[in-house]
């Protein structure tokens, strides 16, 4: 199955092109627009999602930055010690991935992978299923705290406000129907993954030695600027200022939206990375995975009739 998908599944950008062409065809076939009129509408609406694109990129980037902090890595390593059998490892990695993805999908993607590797260093377990279970938690992301559409429509000034208005997260993310579905998935997904665990003779294992990828947290001072880049004082001053704003925001009755979620994750990462340099090193790694979001969201067909 993996080889089949690898052979025939194209890059997501190809789907963007195909969907754009399908939208062009639908606009001409069902709305009666001419080719040039459709192209003009597409061009006019091309930049309408610019803010949304940056918000989505920051969900991934800030989630990655927080997940890669020494504090979060330490928690994951301690949690990994709770599993002593392959079955426990599968259930535990699924449950942790579900929680992390519900909190923030960018956070969940990284936490799931890091936790799977931490478990594989502790327990001899079927590695392909362990990794699949780590990413299966992603199934809850759009019903979670960083669900893109629920948070977008809860943000003042969003691109569809003139049509649907502003809809608070209490009617989407925290609605009973959504919480019921999320709760059911938290029960069903770990059990399904556990049932897929093969017998020991059919399992594929990985050498724990190849999974030791703990980042270097040592501080090297070779030039005057290094003192500033490795200053905990600077990081904590700006970081705790951000937390103070978040506290006041919710005290004033503010609700969840994309901007405040990204703000929270960013400033928690600022504090937990402890120095500007560690934060920026994490940022450099995070943005490598963001190119698809930047380009694909910008190229998504937007036709305003």
Image (cartoon, rainbow, N blue to C red):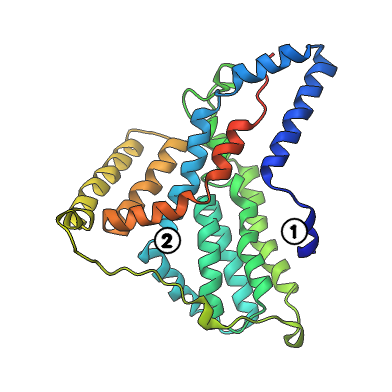
Q: Where is residue 183 in the image (x, y as percent from the top left)?
A: 63, 55
**Dot 1: within a 10 Å radius of its alpha carbon, few (fewer than 14), some, or many (20 or more) residues?**
few
Q: Residue at x 58, y 71 (%)?
A: 92
Rendered-image quadrant of the C terminus: top right
| Quarter of the image where one finds residue 301 | top right
The residue where tag 1 is placed is 6
Measured in 3D between alpha carbons, the distance from the residue under mark 2 to the one under mark 1, in whole angstroms, is 28 Å
Q: Position of residue 5 (x, y in %)?
A: 77, 58
Q: Which numbered disc, 2 or 1, marks the residue that appears first in the sequence?
A: 1
Along the line of sight, the residue nearer the viewer: 74 or 225: 225
**Dot 2: within a 10 Å radius of its alpha carbon, few (fewer than 14), some, or many (20 or more) residues?**
many
Position of residue 196 relative to residue 294, above or below, is: below
Q: Do the residues labelled 2 and 1 touch (CB within 8 Å)?
A: no
Q: Which of marks 2 and 1 is in front?
A: 1
Q: Position of residue 67 (x, y in %)?
A: 44, 59
Q: Residue 68 carries which label?
A: 2
Q: Which residue is drawn at 80% across and 14% down?
A: 31
Under tag 1, what secondary structure? helix
Rendered-image quadrant of the N terminus: bottom right
- Residue 304 in sight: no
Q: Where is residue 275 in the image (x, y as percent from the top left)?
A: 26, 57
Q: Residue 179 carries which label?
A: none
Position of residue 88 relative to residue 270, above or below, is: below
Under tag 2, what secondary structure? loop
């Amino acid at each position: 199955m993996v080889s089949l998908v690898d052979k025939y599944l194209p890059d997501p950008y190809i789907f963007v092109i195909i969907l754009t062409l399908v939208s062009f065809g639908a606009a001409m076939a069902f709305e009666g627009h001419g080719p040039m009129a459709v192209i003009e509408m597409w061009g006019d609406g091309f930049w309408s999602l610019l803010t949304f694109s940056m918000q989505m990129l920051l969900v991934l980037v800030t989630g990655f930055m927080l997940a890669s902090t020494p504090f979060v890595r330490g928690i994951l390593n301690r949690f990994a010690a709770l599993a002593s059998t392959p079955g426990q490892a599968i259930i535990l990695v699924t449950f942790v991935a579900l929680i992390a993805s519900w909190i923030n999908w960018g956070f969940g993607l990284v936490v799931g992978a890091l936790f799977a590797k931490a478990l594989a260093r502790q327990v001899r377990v079927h590695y392909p299923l362990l990794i699949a279970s780590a990413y299966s938690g992603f199934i809850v992301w759009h019903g979670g705290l960083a669900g893109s559409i629920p948070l977008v429509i809860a943000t003042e000034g969003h691109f569809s406000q003139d049509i649907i208005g502003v809809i608070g997260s209490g009617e989407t993310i925290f609605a009973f129907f959504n919480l019921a579905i999320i709760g059911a998935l938290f029960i069903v997904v770990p059990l399904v993954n556990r049932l897929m665990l093969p017998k020991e003779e059919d399992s594929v294992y990985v050498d724990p030695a190849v999974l030791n990828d703990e980042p270097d947290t040592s501080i090297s001072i070779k030039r005057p600027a290094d003192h500033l880049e490795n200053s905990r004082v600077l990081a904590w001053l700006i970081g705790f200022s951000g937390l103070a704003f978040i506290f006041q925001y919710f005290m004033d009755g503010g609700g969840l939206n994309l901007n405040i979620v990204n703000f929270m994750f960013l400033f928690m990462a600022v504090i937990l990375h402890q120095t500007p340099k560690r934060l920026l090193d994490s940022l450099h790694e995070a943005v490598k995975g963001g190119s698809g979001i930047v380009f694909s969201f910008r190229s998504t067909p937007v036709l305003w009739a």
